[in-house]
Amino acid sequence: MNGKKKNETKQDGYLHIKEENMMKWVGYWRKNPQKFVTDYLGMNLFLYQKILMYMMGKIDFFMYIAARGQGKSYLIAIFCIVRSILYPSSNIILASGTRGQASKIITEKIVSLYNNYPAVRYEIGDIKNIKNSINDTSVTFPNGSKIQAVTSNDNARGLRGNILVVDEFRLVKKDVVDKILKPMLNVNRHPAFMDLPEYKDVPTEENKELYISSAWYKTNWIWDSFKDFVKKMIKNQNTFVVDLPYQLSIKHKLLSQDRVMQQRSAENMDQTGFAMEYEALFVGENDKAYYKLAPLNKIRTINKTFMPPTDMEFIENKARSNPKKLSNLKRIDNSEIRLVALDIALMGGNKNVKNDTSAFTCFRLIKDGDEYRRDIVYLESIQQSIATEDLAIRLKQLYYDFEADYVVMDANGNGLGVFDACCRVLYDKNRDTEYPAWACVNDQATNERNKTDGLKMVYTVKANAQFNHEIAVQLKTVIENGKLRLPMNDIEKREELVSEGGFVKKSAEEQHRDLYAYQQASALVNELVNLEYDIRDGGYIRIHEVGSTTKDRYSSIAYGNYYANEFEKKLKDNYSDKDLLNYLMM
């Protein structure tokens, strides 16, 4: 009997020592979570990932601005797992611009770690503990910890957590962060042992806020938040912020130099987009810019754009017994007016050499009382050199595809040659279609020079100092009063398409087509905020390029907006006449 008690005492002592040793290891790993990742989970981390993991564990207010290719979602997933294991009963909230993006950290990254690392499988247990449904995307641990993805909107109100991780927080509104996400942290983690008398003086464990994102515009709230984090970090106020560019990704072979250079020169990537996505730089407007970034970003609200048919789609539709209209945008009513504006260049250009490009802009003029709202639903630029007749054919393609009413173009210089081509019947060999001759709607002398009796649908502009002043001021006015609307940011649109499902399965060409108008709108905004202005004799404003910047998209949209104003003047006159008539008949 005594021997049995001795064995039990010996065993109890062994278990006590084992528990003490385990708690020492837990204490060590809590202070060094990067070591826990390698020692226990068996994962390899790069030096920068070890540093970030250490700071995520040490600091309560953490911000990481990352370039593409640094595996930030992967790092978030690892941190959430580590925290859940080392701190039982943790409740981690994963938020993002869309619930789909936050859910992917669980459904893709954590599931991948579960499948590839035995220690992760052991700690999570049954795969059923990883849930993925419409109402519940979460990971539940046997020790009481939980990781859950939430929607960054009112539907998330009332949830509670100890750790808040906001991925791509540049896409989350500040009000949502302040009024919905942060209040989730009003309850601290409270392990059962904290209720024991001997722990009554132990301070409460602080909750954590972690913000991870690519860089964004300086007009967005995250720029002020970034600067605030920097100031607090300098003052050692339990805050950490880091900004890591693409060179780090190249160093660790997460990206190749060739791939980065290809992206930099890609047609759909401008310098501003590259600066934010790869160089991790926050971007603002030129100090001398006439057009400011804040009002431009405010009017980027259109989430459905015009998508021109391909030549193959056109041919297949033409072969149908009853061809359908190919425009994906129906007219609101008969009062809607559609314009295609064109700024003309024939030599082409690129990002490194200052050359012009031809730029198309498709307008929908939507009647709103005695005014017209101007919706820009499609933009297109041609950067390579193009023959006069080929540019005229592309213009006619867009005109008929868009079911437009009028065309606006500059009839000076190269524009005169394109206008002359438009005044002829043109054969489109790619579509096996003939387009009728056009004529000018506002300059009979131009028609007489061409001896054309074509369809009157071309509004020609001939720039001079006064005209250039007027289009600059008019464009700024409709931007600032919200009468002009642009497609939403292409990065936000991509997140939206990904969350809806099916987008990532499309080919690169299909994805490019889906996002093209939104990317062109971003290029327009970046072009506008980098143009400078001066005031010439007579008080006329002159908009001009600096360095390798161009103003082709600006000219195109400014021409179209000028003609929209002409329509609006007529509309206001009609309303005035009706008001006068109604007054006289009283």
Image: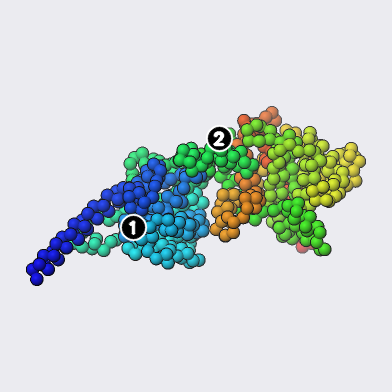
Furthest residue in direction bottom, as rendered? 1
Amino acid carrying mark 1 in the image:
Ile
Give me the residue at 77% from left, 42% from top: 391
| Apparent side of residue 77 relative to residue 427 in the rendered image (left or right) | left
Give me the residue at 27% from left, 56% from top: 204
Whole-percent x, y for residue 568 in the image: 74, 50
* Relative height, residue 244 to residue 147 (above, below): above
Q: Pointer 2: what residue?
A: 287
Residue 465 lies in quadrant: top right
Bin the neighbour count of mark 2 within 10 Å (Cα to Cα): few under 14, some 14-19, many 20 and up. few
Discs 2, 1 touching: Cβ within 8 Å:
no
Label drawn at residue 100: none
Q: Nearer the viewer, residue 138 or 410?
A: 138
Furthest residue in direction left, as rendered? 2
Closer to the chain start, of discs 2 and 1, is 1
User: Which marked residue is nearer to the observer: mark 2 or mark 1?
Assistant: 1
What distance separates the C-alpha of mark 2 from that of mark 1? 50 Å
Whole-percent x, y for residue 180 in the image: 44, 58
| Apparent side of residue 414 relative to residue 42 in the rendered image (left or right) | right
Q: Nearer the viewer, residue 456 or 196?
A: 196
Residue 474 lies in quadrant: top right
Q: Pointer 1: what residue?
A: 85
Amino acid carrying mark 2 in the image:
Asp
Whole-percent x, y for residue 53 in the image: 37, 47
* Relative height, residue 179 to residue 418 (above, below): below
In which quadrant will I find the C terminus?
bottom right
- Count of marks placed on residues: 2
Q: Secondary structure at mark 2?
A: loop
Q: Is residue 260 visible?
A: yes
Whole-percent x, y for residue 556 in the image: 71, 42
Give me the residue at 46% from left, 38% from top: 251
